């Protein structure tokens, strides 16, 4: 049956409650307005509120389906204390049209339990048990079966359950409920799971009046970059991943991130990378009514190793290349700037792996590629097709490549041949039949050189019986 999943104060005042069947609700209040529940939209809205709450603390966790946990230890004094901070958060969300119930306690479960029956309660350390004892069992948020079983046993409040022996409650309702009860009473605690990992370094700038001009935003980012570099320099670290967050007055949050190939220790480099990133945005940074907070954090850092440089100009080439890759990656994306690394395999299409240049530049510089014999043609073509293209054989040579073949509607007559080079597929990676390949380097009458292979070997039984072999031939690459 249809049930109520959420309601407002007006509906609660007439006796409606969450979980009540819709038919009963209409019998109690015929003029009740009903809307279909949208769990996806609710989750998106909750995530948006969580992003907005990042301006108060970086440790924000989801308490699905309708709650949030904010770890405000060490940051409440920045907003005038716990009471002022809670009133600020609740007041802004209420002004945006949300119904808010908030509480502050030493444990997350205790705070969540209080929010279900009272708004604005602040519980000091050691007073958790006294605060939650008068509340009903349903406030804990336990399973319906557990709440029903406790009520049938005559235990209606949290204090009634707390007065019973712990082993009795565990034996009847499980260790999970006992752990929840102890956390609500303040006897134990469990850390929250933040949506995002805590950055290594954070600097931010708050504005008394919202800012919207590009000049002020750029100047603010430059100033924050200097502060961030100074904070990292005290511990000898550089940033590998940087994130700039722009908090709008209407609650929207925009995040822009850049990665670097080497640890960055200069503010001008950070400023230049973000300018490149902002200029390349498909969706320009919309300030709306303005930003009241801009934050810059280093989510990944590394220790900077000091290197002794000589007077050789080639020593600085890698730094210049790395800086160029960072700028290109900031403009078009890090995944689009790649380097090729050799792989320990004899399968041609798996012999090279394309990885992000920012993270594998040093490996690419030190990679050991197969050496080419001077005066000899290359063993592998310059261009290798992603998918081999099948060719049509017109005339063929026994145990050899085609004498004439058609590829892309053009006929080629073979005049020179080198091969075969036999390549057996890796059987431990096969997800089906993997045939042995015989590769040939061939040249046609016009001097074009191709890399052909035969998929599968000739059947000796068919050869003894005089039957013509019928393997498939493919074009795998082109030589320069």
Image: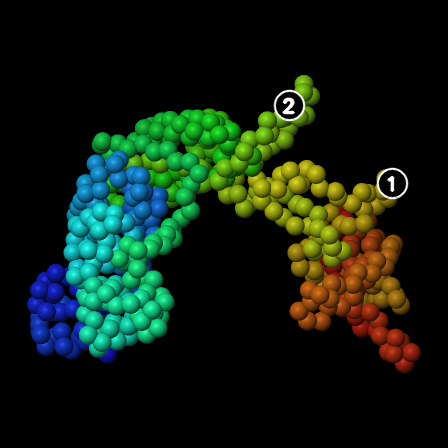
Residue 226 location (% of width, % of height): 42, 26
Q: Which mark is residue 375?
A: 1
| x 8%, y 72%: residue | 29
Task: Work out whether residue 358 or residue 443 is closer to the camera in this orientation and state it.
Answer: 358
Residue 32 location (% of width, % of height): 11, 69
Residue 336 location (% of width, % of height): 55, 45
Is 203 situated left or right of 11 in this image?
A: right
Query: Is the Cβ of the residue at disc 1 closer than 8 Å to that at disc 2?
Result: no
Q: Nearer the viewer, mark 1 or mark 2?
A: 2
Q: Which residue is mark 2?
A: 308
Task: Work out whether residue 353 or residue 336 is closer to the camera in this orientation and state it.
Answer: 353
| x 47%, y 33%: residue | 273
Task: Work out whether residue 302 or residue 384 is closer to the camera in this orientation and state it.
Answer: 302
| x 40%, y 48%: residue | 196
**Element carrying mark 2:** loop
> Does any portion of residue 278 appear in the rendered image?
no
Q: Which mark is residue 242?
A: none
Mark with earlier residue (1, 2): 2
Q: In this rendering, is residue 78 above or below 19?
A: above
Q: In this rendering, is residue 56 above or below 11?
A: above
Is 204 situated left or right of 164 in this image?
A: right
| x 71%, y 71%: residue | 433
The quadrant the C terminus occupies is top right
Quadrant in which residue 432 is drawn: bottom right
Q: In this rendering, is residue 40 above or below 284?
A: below
**Element carrying mark 1:** loop
Is 279 situated left or right of 51 in this image?
A: right
Residue 209 location (% of width, % of height): 22, 32
Label 2: few (<14), some (14–19) or many (≥20) C-alpha neighbours in 10 Å: few
> Does any portion of residue 306 appear in the rendered image?
yes
Label 1: few (<14), some (14–19) or many (≥20) C-alpha neighbours in 10 Å: few
């Amino acid at each position: 049956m249809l049930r109520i999943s959420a309601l407002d104060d007006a509906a609660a005042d007439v006796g409606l409650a969450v979980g009540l069947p819709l038919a009963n609700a209409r019998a109690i209040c015929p003029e009740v307005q009903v809307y279909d529940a949208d769990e996806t939209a609710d989750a998106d809205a909750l995530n948006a509120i969580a992003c907005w709450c990042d301006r108060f603390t970086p440790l924000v966790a989801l308490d699905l389906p309708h709650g949030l946990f904010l770890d405000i230890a060490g940051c409440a004094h920045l907003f005038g204390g716990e009471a002022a901070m809670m009133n600020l958060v609740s007041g802004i969300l209420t002004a945006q049209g949300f119904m808010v119930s908030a509480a502050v306690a030493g444990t997350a479960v205790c705070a969540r339990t209080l929010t279900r029956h009272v708004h604005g309660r602040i519980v000091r350390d050691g007073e958790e048990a006294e605060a939650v004892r008068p509340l009903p069992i349903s406030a804990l948020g336990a399973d319906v079966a557990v709440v029903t079983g406790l009520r049938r046993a005559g235990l209606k409040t949290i204090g009634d359950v707390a007065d019973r022996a712990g082993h009795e409650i565990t034996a009847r309702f499980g260790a999970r409920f006992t752990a929840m009860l102890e956390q609500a009473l303040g006897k134990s605690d469990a850390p929250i799971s933040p949506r995002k990992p805590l950055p290594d370094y954070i600097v931010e700038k708050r504005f008394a009046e919202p800012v919207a001009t590009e000049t002020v935003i750029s100047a603010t980012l430059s100033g924050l970059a200097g502060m961030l570099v100074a904070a990292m320099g005290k511990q000898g670290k550089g940033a590998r991943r940087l994130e700039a967050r722009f908090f709008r007055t209407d609650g929207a949050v925009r995040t822009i991130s850049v990665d670097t190939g080497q640890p960055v220790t200069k503010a001008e480099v950070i400023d230049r990378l973000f300018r490149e990133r902002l200029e390349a945005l498909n969706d320009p940074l919309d300030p709306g009514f303005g930003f009241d907070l801009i934050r810059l954090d280093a989510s990944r850092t590394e220790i900077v190793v000091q290197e002794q440089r000589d007077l050789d100009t080639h020593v600085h080439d890698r730094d210049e290349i790395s800086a160029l890759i960072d700028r290109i990656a900031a403009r078009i994306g890090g995944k689009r700037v790649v380097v090729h690394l050799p792989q320990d395999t004899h399968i041609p299409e798996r012999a090279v792996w394309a990885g992000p240049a920012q993270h594998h530049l040093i490996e690419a510089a030190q990679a050991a590629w197969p050496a080419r014999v001077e005066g000899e043609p290359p063993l592998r073509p310059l261009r290798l097709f992603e998918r081999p293209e099948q060719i049509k054989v017109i005339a063929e040579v026994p145990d050899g490549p085609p004498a004439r073949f058609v590829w892309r509607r053009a006929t080629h007559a073979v005049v020179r041949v080198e091969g075969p080079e036999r390549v057996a597929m890796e059987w431990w990676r096969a997800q089906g039949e993997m045939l042995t390949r015989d590769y040939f380097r061939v040249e046609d009458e016009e001097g074009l050189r191709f890399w052909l292979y035969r998929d599968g070997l000739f059947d000796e039984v068919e050869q003894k019986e005089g039957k013509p072999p019928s393997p498939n031939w493919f074009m795998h690459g082109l030589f320069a």
